[in-house]
Amino acid sequence: MQQRCYSYRVPDTATEMVPFCRPGDDITVCPVDKVELNKHVVLYKHVVLCDLEETRCLVRYLAGETATHWVVEQCNPRGRISLNKSEWPTVKKICGVKFNQAAPGNRAIPPLG
């Protein structure tokens, strides 16, 4: 069975990875590509609150890993933290970012004239 790439929209409140991606941008991940160190990734965890279930994700730079933790970096504010692999068991490689020109803090170039 062939798996396809899929995208996530960066939430309006997620500013930790500016300038790599901004709120409103679309992050595309490839479920079959091998995750590499020193690349941007999406980390996932499954959360159950009362009767509600959801998947949460983070966009981060994968700086390293140990047997039990992912070592990740964020841009804004700059920092490095460790995330427990048992809490964040799934990591996918980012294969593209679609910049949303209408998003706050966009990269749009004003029209000439």
Image (cartoon, rainbow, N blue to C red):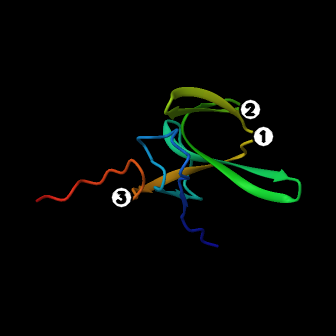
Residue at the spot of label 2: 68
Do callouts 1 and 2 mark residues in contact (Cβ within 8 Å)?
yes
Label disc, if present, on residue 28 of the rendered structure: none
Position of 14 with respect to 47 (left or right) is left
Point out residue 8 in the picture as x, y percentages from the top left corner. 55, 59
Q: Which tag is nearer the camera, tag 3 or tag 2?
A: 3
Viewport quadrant of the N terminus: bottom right
Position of 38 with respect to 69 (left or right) is left
Residue at 47 percent across and 55 percent down: it is 95
Residue at 60 percent across and 71 percent down: it is 2
Q: CA distance from mark 3 to mark 1?
A: 36 Å
Point out residue 104 in the picture as x, y percentages from the top left corner. 42, 51
Point out residue 41 in the picture as x, y percentages from the top left corner. 55, 45
Q: Secondary structure at mark 2?
A: loop
Viewport quadrant of the C terminus: bottom left
Q: CA distance from mark 3 to mark 2?
A: 39 Å
Q: Which tag is nearer the camera, tag 1 or tag 2?
A: 1
For marks 3 and 2 on the same chain, the one whose residue lies earlier in the sequence: 2
For marks 1 and 2 on the same chain, the one whose residue lies earlier in the sequence: 2
Picture quarter containing residue 112? Answer: bottom left
- Which residue lies most toward the bottom here? 1
Residue at the spot of label 3: 101
The answer to whether 84 is drawn above or below residue 26 in the figure is above
Label disc, if present, on residue 86 of the rendered structure: 1
